[in-house]
C-alpha cells in the first residue's frame, strides 16, 4: 500500500470552507490534549478564553488592536504575492516605517499646524517602508537576486538600526536609560474611539484594503500585476515592463507594511521602543497565506490570528503558563491550520500493490 498527495484539478469554494471547518475542529481537539498535558481542565480553559476575548470590553479592544497591524502586513505580503513575488521583509519594512515617522515626530513636533504632523508621519512611514521594499525589488528586477533571501536579511538590518538609535541618539535620558524615545505629543498620536485603545489605524487599514482590492480588479495596473503573476511570458509579450512593475509592487508592499509600524507607534505606544513588533511582519506571511493572497480575505485571517495572539495571552495571565508554553500553543494552532490547508490543494491517494 502506498500513500501520496495528488494535486486537485479544481478546488471549490465549499471545499475550502469545509477544510477550514475541519482545521477548526482539529485545533479544538489538539488544544484539548495540550491543556491536559499542562495540567489545565480543558472545558474550563475554553470557557475562560471565550469569555475573556468575546464577552469583555477589553477582550474586543485587544483583538482589534492586534488585528490592525496584521491587516497591514498581511495586505503587504498579499499584494506582492499577486505577482508571484514573495515579500518576506514586512518585518523590516514595519521597522523602517517606525524609524521614518519617529524621526518626523522628534524633529517637527510643535513646529507644524494641527493635523499636519500626523499626516507627515503617515507619509514618512510609507516612504520608509516603501524604500526598504524597493531594495529587494530592485535587486530582483535588475540582477535576478532571490527576493526571499534579500527581503529576509533586510529584516535583521532594520531591527539592528532601530536598536542602534534607541540605545544611542534617540534614547530618552529621563527614563532610566531604557531603550525608548520620549513620548510623542498629542499632535503625533492617532485619535482613539471613546475611552478605548482602538484607534483610527483600524479604519485606515480597511481603507487600504479597499484601495488595493479596487486597484487589483478594477484598474489596468492591477490587471498587469495579476497577469504577470499568472503568466510572465504573456505579460511580457503584451508590453508589460516587468522590471519596473516588480520595483513598483515591492515599493507599494513595503509602504503598506510601513503603515503597520505607523499604526502601532502612533496609535498604541506613542513612542518608539525596543521590540515594538511582536512579529507582526512575519505573522503577516501567515495572514496572507490563509487569505489566499486576497485583500478581502486578509480581514478574516488577520482576525483569526489576533484571536490566536490574545488567547495565548489569556492562558499566560490566567494560568501563569511560561512563555515557552504559550509559544508552543501558538505553534500547534498555526501548524494545524496551515497543515490542513494543504488538503485544499491536494488530495490523499492510496494505492494497493497487487500480488
Image (cartoon, grey):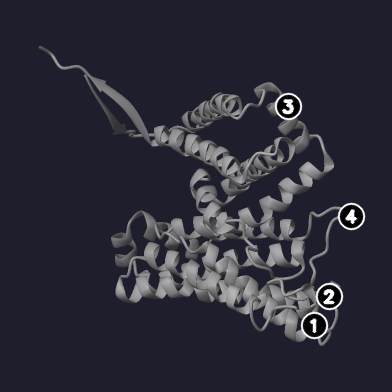
Mark 2 to mark 3 CA distance (whole Å): 41 Å
**Residue at (34%, 29%) from the top-left corner?**
347
The crowding category of the residue bearing disc 1, from other C-alpha atoms within 10 Å (few below 14, some 14 to 19, many at least 20), is some
> Which one is earlier in the sequence, the residue at label 4 or at label 1?
1
> Which one is earlier in the sequence, the residue at label 3 or at label 1?
3
In this rendering, does residue 223 appear at all? Answer: no
**Residue at (63%, 47%) from the top-left corner?**
299
User: Residue 135: x and y, percent?
Assistant: 44, 75
Dot 4 lies on which element? loop
The crowding category of the residue bearing disc 3, from other C-alpha atoms within 10 Å (few below 14, some 14 to 19, many at least 20), is few
> Which one is earlier in the sequence, the residue at label 2 or at label 1?
1
Mark 3 to mark 4 CA distance (whole Å): 29 Å
Res. 185 mark: 2
Find disc 3 in the rendering and name its residue. Answer: 47
The reply to whether the C-beta atoms of the residues labelled 2 and 1 are less than 8 Å apart is: yes
Residue 193 in which image quadrant: bottom right
| On-image quarter of the C terminus | top left
The crowding category of the residue bearing disc 4, from other C-alpha atoms within 10 Å (few below 14, some 14 to 19, many at least 20), is few
Q: Nearer the viewer, residue 267 or 15?
A: 267
- Tag nearer the camera, 4 or 1: 1
Mark 3 to mark 1 CA distance (whole Å): 46 Å
Find disc 4 in the rendering and name its residue. Answer: 194
> Which one is earlier in the sequence, the residue at label 2 or at label 3?
3
Find disc 1 in the rendering and name its residue. Answer: 109
User: Residue 235: x and y, percent?
Assistant: 34, 63
Amino acid at each position: 500500500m502506498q500513500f501520496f498527495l495528488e494535486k486537485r484539478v479544481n478546488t471549490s469554494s465549499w471545499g475550502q470552507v469545509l477544510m477550514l471547518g475541519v482545521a477548526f475542529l482539529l485545533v479544538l481537539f489538539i488544544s484539548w490534549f495540550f491543556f491536559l498535558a499542562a495540567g489545565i481542565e480543558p472545558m474550563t480553559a475554553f470557557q475562560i478564553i471565550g469569555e475573556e476575548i468575546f464577552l469583555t470590553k477589553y477582550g474586543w479592544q485587544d483583538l482589534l488592536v492586534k488585528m490592525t497591524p496584521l491587516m497591514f502586513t498581511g495586505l503587504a505580503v498579499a499584494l506582492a504575492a499577486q505577482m508571484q513575488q514573495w515579500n518576506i521583509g514586512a518585518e523590516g519594512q514595519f521597522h523602517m516605517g517606525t524609524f521614518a515617522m519617529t524621526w518626523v515626530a522628534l524633529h517637527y513636533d510643535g513646529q507644524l499646524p494641527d493635523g499636519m504632523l500626523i499626516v507627515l508621519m503617515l507619509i514618512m512611514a510609507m516612504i520608509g517602508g516603501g524604500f526598504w521594499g524597493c531594495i529587494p525589488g530592485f535587486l530582483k528586477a535588475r540582477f535576478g537576486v532571490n527576493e526571499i533571501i534579500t527581503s529576509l536579511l533586510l529584516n535583521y538590518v532594520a531591527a539592528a538600526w532601530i536598536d542602534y538609535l534607541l540605545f544611542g541618539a534617540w534614547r530618552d535620558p529621563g527614563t532610566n536609560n531604557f531603550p525608548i524615545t520620549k513620548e510623542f505629543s498629542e499632535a503625533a498620536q492617532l485619535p482613539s474611539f471613546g475611552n478605548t485603545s482602538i484607534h483610527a489605524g483600524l479604519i485606515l487599514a480597511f481603507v487600504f484594503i479597499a484601495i488595493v482590492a479596487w486597484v487589483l480588479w478594477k484598474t489596468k495596473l492591477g490587471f498587469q500585476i495579476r497577469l504577470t503573476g499568472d503568466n510572465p511570458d504573456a505579460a511580457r509579450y503584451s508590453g508589460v515592463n516587468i522590471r519596473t512593475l516588480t520595483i513598483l509592487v515591492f515599493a507599494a508592499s513595503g509602504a503598506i507594511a510601513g503603515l503597520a509600524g505607523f499604526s502601532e507607534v502612533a496609535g498604541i505606544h506613542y513612542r518608539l521602543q525596543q521590540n515594538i513588533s511582536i512579529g507582526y511582519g512575519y505573522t503577516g506571511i501567515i495572514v496572507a497565506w490563509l487569505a489566499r493572497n486576497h485583500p478581502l480575505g486578509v480581514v478574516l485571517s488577520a482576525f483569526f490570528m489576533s484571536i490566536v495572539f490574545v488567547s495565548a495571552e489569556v492562558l499566560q495571565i490566567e494560568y501563569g503558563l511560561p512563555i515557552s508554553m504559550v509559544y508552543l500553543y501558538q505553534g500547534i494552532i498555526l501548524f494545524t491550520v496551515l497543515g490542513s490547508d494543504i488538503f485544499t490543494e491536494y488530495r490523499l491517494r492510496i494505492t494497493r500493490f497487487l500480488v
